[in-house]
Image (cartoon, rainbow, N blue to C red):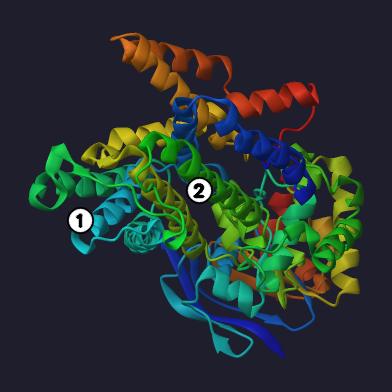
Amino acid sequence: MSLLETRALAKSFGETHAVDHVDFRVDKGEVLALIGSNGAGKTTLVNLISGLIPSDSGTVVFDGHDITRASVHEKIAAGIARSFQLVNLFDQLTSLDNLSLAIFSREGKTRRLFARADADAAVRDEAQAVLEQFAMGAKAGVRAGGLSQGERKLLDIAVAYALKPKLLFLDEPTSGVSTREKAPIMDIIAAIVQAGHITAVIIEHDMDVVFRYCARIVAMHQGKILADGTPDQIRANAEVTANLLGTQAGSH
Amino acid sequence: MSGLDASPRALVRVGVPVLIALAVLPFVAPPYQTVLLSYGLIFAIAALGFNLLLGYTGLLSFGHSAYFGMGAYAATLSVKYFKWTSMEALLLSGLVATALIALVFGFLCVRYTRIFFGILAMALSQVLWSLAFKFFWVTGGSDGLRVPTPTLLGGLVTMGTGDKLDFLSHRYYFYVLALFALAVVTMWRIVHSPFGKALQAIRDNETRAEFVGVGVRRYRLVAFVISGLYTGLAGVLWVPLNGLTTPDILHWSFSGKIVFFTVLGGFQTFAGPIVGAVVFNYLETYAVGHTVYWQLVLGVVLVTLVLALPAGIVGTALRWLRGPGHRTA
């Protein structure tokens, strides 16, 4: 059963058709990889769906509702959350407060003007539990700005996860971190996604990661969907091999 | 960001001794000193409100004279046209007028950030200044309007036939002090609430705030109105103390002073704006009293302070207290 469907979704930047009338579907409960070389339109597609940038045309239907023109926070409320390739955190707030804020927001508590944020044990405990899940329990009191790149990446994902979305987009969860940190990060994410039966779309360059963790792969090229199938089907697809996997092998 | 622990105990530990010292002051200090401090406390309320925008929401307003002036003029005109004498009635009229103007100006301003926000806020405040300046048959123009001393607590406390200085340095001082304390406690609660955290999140990363579901513009507007109300409250309280309401409190240079209070004290701390406003008020008063070149002296002193203490007075003091390496948030 489809959770998200885009129909002829399009976005151009000048002459470049970044996303060229894409029909993209995500089914409930699946972990899907979105692959493609740089400039293929993966991140733009996610930006359109999540509301970071407006689309030129086409529709986005989520959970039976047309959300094409919904604002970002309406989409969040509907159950779409995302992490960012370039980390977006509240740098002066502690790790715990970064997560607490997501939970307060999810529960509609950010309207509370006079309640003590620190005194909300349920929110604090949940935030701490999420940190533990992401193996960052010891970093609760550290400001986000003072974390390592790998930790920032994890916290960025944890903030999206703490919103308890129906659909979670992870935009290159392991980019920009050292090779040493890559595998542990992906293992943590995979464990959480599987344990929580979360529907997730992972944009990823690293084909090892993609083939290991994702049951379905959508390959994009020059703004269009080139192939859509299981890892085996994608590996066997000559067009994908020629356009993506070949160049990937060269660049990694 | 709080500059102190977030627990209410931290507020009590620092706040209660300070409050006691402030409450004892009129009995030991000459009346003039008490009146001077009243000005400082009133400016502190304005700066506290201003810093909800700057320190906590990340918006630098160059137009907060609008709300100080709106509070002051609403109170002053209530006296002139309605012959109101109760301070509570003046507070009500001042706060209602400030809330309305802050809602309108805020609605326009929160669509922008950074310098665009600051300049638009300033431009709007200058509109009010020119109105107060030009409509002299209403406002008295640059001559201003005199305001007789109001009664306090619904007429229970009055000046009677007594001395005005005595009234201002005792009864009115305590009135200001009580509202100051209330304003501080309320602001403390706001910045440590989930709402306050949402503002800090907006300050740190507007995009991410949207992406955790915080409607950034609406939160900014609410912060703007609260900020305006604080500054408006200060404006009303200033009226009886000064006794004469003139358009200079609507002028952009007065907005600049509010910015300066806050930066001087340290905008990254809760107490910074309070300390900055009180210190600035003393510096300015003594500079004016001692030399005709007071603006030069004041300027040099302030530039030196800001260069020597980039984190502000309170921010620097906290760093010393905590020793190197301790996080200042």
Residue B78 point in image, percent of width and height: 26, 59
In space, the residues marked 2 and 1 are separated at their CA atoms by 23 Å
Q: Secondary structure at mark 2?
A: helix
**First-in-chain label (2 vs 1):** 1
Asked if labels 2 and 1 share a chain, the reply is yes
| Residue at 75% in and 73% down | A164
Pick the residue in front: A37 or B323: B323
Figure quadrant of the C terminus of chain B: top right
| Residue at 37% in and 48% down | B160
Residue A195 point in image, percent of width and height: 91, 73
What mark, if any, has residue B175 been given in the picture?
Answer: 2
Residue B201 point in image, percent of width and height: 62, 53
Whether residue B220 is situated above or below residue B72 in the rendered picture: below
Question: Is residue B255 in view?
Answer: yes
Q: Residues within 10 Å of mark 1 (few under 14, many from 20)?
A: some
Pick the residue in front: B273 or A44: B273
Q: Quadrant of residue A191?
A: bottom right
Whether residue B295 is situated above or below residue B28 in the rendered picture: above
Query: Tag 2, which chain?
Result: B
Whether residue A221 is situated above or below residue A216 in the rendered picture: above
Query: Tag 1, which chain?
Result: B
Pick the residue in front: A31 or A218: A31
Residue A234 point in image, percent of width and height: 76, 70
Q: Amino acid at mark 2?
A: Tyr
Check disc 1 and report the residue beneath it. Answer: B80
Q: Pick out the residue farthest to the front.
A: B161
Number of marks in the image? 2
Pick the residue in front: B212 or B109: B109
Q: Quadrant of residue B28?
A: top right
| Residue at 35% in and 50% down | B67
| Left or right of A179 in this view: B96 | left
| Left or right of B92 in this view: A2 | right
